[in-house]
Structure formats: structure tokens, C-alpha cells
Amino acid sequence: MLMLQNLDRLKVFYYVFFEGSVFSAANKLHVSQSAISQSLQKLESEIQSPLFIRMHKRLVPTAAGERLFAVLRPFMLELESCLKNIEQARDKPFGELRIGAPVEFGKAYFPGIVAKFREEYPDVTFYLKFGDPGTLLPLVETGRIDFAFVDVFLTRKQFFANLDIYHFDPVVEEEVILASSNRYYEKFIKNDHSFKHLLEQKFITYRHNAQTVKNWFKHHFDKYNVKLQIVLTVDSQQAVISAIKHDAGIGIVASHLVDEEIQNGIIIPINTSKPKIINQISLVLLQDKIPTLTEKIFQKFLMDRIQSMNLLRAPER
């Protein structure tokens, strides 16, 4: 397999071809004409094929030279555009932001926040990836997303990765509740919030392991590995909310997603004497990563939007 010893020679060839002469290429690259000629000769020697026919005061590309230029031309144009974009991103928000977020939080708020941000900064585009920490953290680690927002309670699981490589900065706190429809509550719960009575209820769970419900019982009653009567398992909080409103059972949701239903008495939170459960959503990026200007401005914009929402709250600093 042919390996070029010096890729700079391809740049020299490109400019000689593009400018049509050694003299013009030398001026463009700020080197001597002899350096250009030597570089071309070495490249032709490496690929064992002439790239130009030397005629009086001009160079005529060979078939090999034409093919090589056809390959280099789109790359050089894309490279020039890429470098220009990088330069612009140093002075103002520019380019693509790749962001991860919890599924329900991301779906509920990020499209609107992104739309508002682009009204001010139209040169920024977005790629959004929604998932739990097990999905998002590896993407941050490998650089496939720039940063992510991850939650704790609603997707709690054991991680075997090295968390020391990440920086966690709390940005949002949301209350997590056990919720019931008004009709189900009046028929089955009847103001009895005791451990034994609640354990007899029908549960709608967020994923197969029902970990969110188990975490609720652990917090409120110090009970572990409770046996639940699970009647429906789904993969999103919106489906849990829908099933609750259809009187299928009770389930765990973030309160801000059902704030209007709670105020209207459609959904009833089931409380105990224990403190409320607060799920913390944190901004996560690699420990040694230096945020770009675009990332810094968007993160501040996001925090300002969160603080302006009555349903969400930013943690105390």
C-alpha cells in the first residue's frame, strides 16, 4: 500500500494545479519557487507518476494530475469552510451543538428552548439525543455529544464507568411524586397513605424493573425490594401519566409534567410525612473539557430560561 511521507506535498500540488504555475503557487504559500519544484518532484517520485508536463513557461496536468486534483478539490473546499466556521465560532455562537438530555425533560422543554435560542443566534444548529445516564455518559466520554443533562432518581442505576472523568453541575431540581387520578384515589386509596395499603395498589411502572416506584418506597418507608402489583409497564413518563389519568393505577412522575392536572384536581399526589423527593438534573461534561463560546452562551441561556419557568427551579448555588 502506497503511503505518502509528507502530506504537505499534496497541498503544494493542489495550489500549483489551481494557480496554473509554480510562481503563483510559491507566492500563495509564501515559499520559494525551488521549494515548490522540489516538493512536486518528490511527490511524483513517491507515486511513481508524472503529474504535470513541463512546457515552456507553463505546466499541463497529466491524467494522473487531473484525477488527484479531482480528489483533493472537494476536500480542500470543505477544509476551508470548516476552518472558517471554527474561526467564526471563536467570536460568536456558531455551528452545531450536540446535547444529551433525559427523555421526558428533553422532550418537554428542549425544542422550545432551542427555538428561542435560534431566534437570537440563527447560526447555531442542534443535535439532541434523549436517554438515561447509561446512554448519555458514554456519548460524552467519546465526544459524540458535547455535553449532557442527566437525572438521578427517575433513571437511577449502577454505573461501572469511571465517574471521575466527568464534571457534574446541578442545573434543575424537580419534585418526584407518586400520582393517582382523582377517581382511582377516591375509589381505592381513600386518604390511607400507609405502607401496607399503598402496597396493595395497582402500579404503572417506568420500565421493567419498576425502580422508580421502589425508590419511592425506599425514601418514604425505608422499605427495600418491595413486591408490587404491576399492571402496566411503559418506557416514558408521558405514557405513565396517560395511564394514571385513565384510572389504570398509580405511578411515579415529575410533578411539573402534571402541574396543571394537579391544580385542577385531575391528578392527586400521594404524600407521607417524609420530605418530598427532589430529582436533580445535572449538566455533565468531561472533566478537562474547555467549553466553547457557543456552549457557554447556550448553557447560560438555558439556565435563564429555567429560572423564568414557574414549574422548574434551579438549585441554590
Image (tube, rainbow, N blue to C red):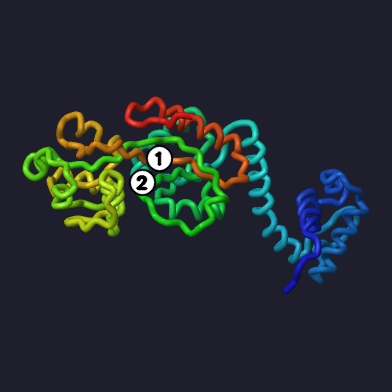
Residue 270 placement (x, y as % from top left): 20, 39
Q: Nearer the viewer, residue 35 or 69?
A: 35
Residue 87 placement (x, y as % from top left): 67, 38
Label 2 belongs to which residue? 153
User: What's under tag 2, amino acid-wise?
Assistant: Phe
Name the residue: 48% across, 42% down. Answer: 126
Label 2: element kind: loop
Q: Residues within 10 Å of mark 1 (few under 14, many from 20)?
A: many
For residue 11, side relative to residue 121 (left or right): right
Q: Nearer the viewer, residue 168 or 7?
A: 168
Q: Residues within 10 Å of mark 2 (few under 14, many from 20)?
A: some
For residue 24, side relative to residue 64 (left or right): right
Label 1 belongs to which residue? 280
For residue 164, side relative to residue 127 (left or right): right
Residue 61 placement (x, y as % from top left): 78, 60
Q: CA distance from mark 1 to mark 2?
A: 8 Å
Q: Nearer the viewer, residue 37 or 221?
A: 221
Q: Quadrant of the N terminus?
A: bottom right
- Most extreme residue toward the front, as rendered? 222
Contact between marks 1 and 2 (CB within 8 A): the answer is: yes
Can residue 144 be seen here? The reply is no
User: What's under tag 1, amino acid-wise?
Assistant: Gln
Name the residue: 28% across, 37% down. Answer: 255
Name the residue: 46% across, 51% down. Answer: 136
Residue 56 placement (x, y as % from top left): 90, 56
